[in-house]
Amino acid sequence: MRNIPAHGRLLIVDDDLMVRMLASESLRHAGFEVSEADCGEQALEMFEEQDFDLLLLDVMMPGIDGYTVCQRLRQHERGKWLPIVMLTGLNDSDSIEQAYLSGATDFITKPINWLLLTQRVRYGLRASHAIAEVTRSQQSLAHAQRLARMGSWEWSLSDARFACSDELRQLFGSDWKLAGAATVELFLSMVRESDRAAVNAARQALMINGQPYQISYGFCRPDGALREVFEQAEAVRDGSGRIVKIEGFTQDISERVEAQQRIEHLALHDGLTGLANRQFFAQLAEVELERARREKSLCAILHLDIDHFK
């Protein structure tokens, strides 16, 4: 995302030359870089060619009016979050509502208080910077979650609403269009049967007692693929200490588990034949000998010697 200058680049769009001249002079004096357009068509052309940090847009203009210009800018990728302050002499609630419906960030009525205009522009730029920072943080978090194959989720206990990130939907291979308890039940049904009771018990303890948990389990995706995940969750309480929500994250650790299983297999099996090796035999023999001692019974070892083979 591009860096925004401290004072910002502004575009004033108004068919009234006097308004443009006074607004430009006031804002340039305050340190802003100002460009001007006398109609909606020219404003759209300039927007395509240049980057602006904020637009001051007159509502009533010949040709394309300010409402239409605002709507077109919002459809543009660069104009989606651009601060747009509407300048209007229409001091009625319907016009103000239409300005916001068109995508306006703020509005100022004419005749314009030039000192107030400067402050409103500064406020609009600060709000835009804050939104940009939040958006950048969200993008960084989503990127990190994709790299870590991790998704976040939350379960509101008051209305049984279950929400999750796009990364979790991809991980579980589900569109998750269901809501509330139905989604939770669907989620639990995907858990590997041997792990289902442990996962359910951990979540129940969290909901009732607020006991956080960390657990690994397997689940079966709708396409039949079995995945191994690590999950961590904790309770969120309101001011009175009542548990109102559960928040957690789930991470795909399938590759890690498979690698660990391969290491364990190689440690206990011959690399050439795939048969159990001496270490495997020693572990098995230790168990059997201990059981024989405990039960005061006998055990036997059958040894087959193959010539010229180790």
Image (cartoon, rainbow, N blue to C red):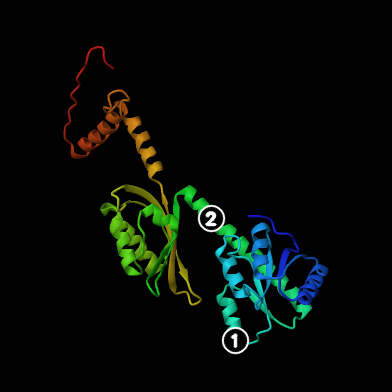
Label placed on residue 178: none
Q: Quadrant of the N terminus?
A: bottom right
Tell me where residue 43 appears, x and y as whole percent.
Answer: 67, 66
Which sits in the foreground, 309 or 139? 139
- When asked about the image quadrant of residue 273, the answer is top left
In this view, the residue in front, 263 or 47, is 47
Nearer to me, 11 or 221: 11
Instruction: Give the mark nearer the N terminus: 2 vs 1.
Output: 1
Q: Is residue 214 something one can see in this rendering?
A: no
- The residue beneath circle 2 is 141
Residue lying at 26% horizontally and 15% vertically, measured from the top left = 309
For disc 1, the marked residue is: 93
The amino acid at mark 2 is Leu
Q: Mark 1 falls on what kind of element? A: helix
Q: Residue furthest top?
A: 308
Q: Secondary structure at mark 2?
A: helix
Q: Residues within 10 Å of mark 1 (few under 14, many from 20)?
A: few
Judge whether 227 appears above or below 51 on screen: above
Residue 10 appears anywhere in the view: yes
Residue 82 to residue 113: above or below: above
Please indicate whether residue 70 sits to the left or right of residue 168 in the image. right
Q: Amino acid at mark 1?
A: Ser
x and y, in percent, of residue 84 in the image: 64, 70
Residue furthest to the front: 63
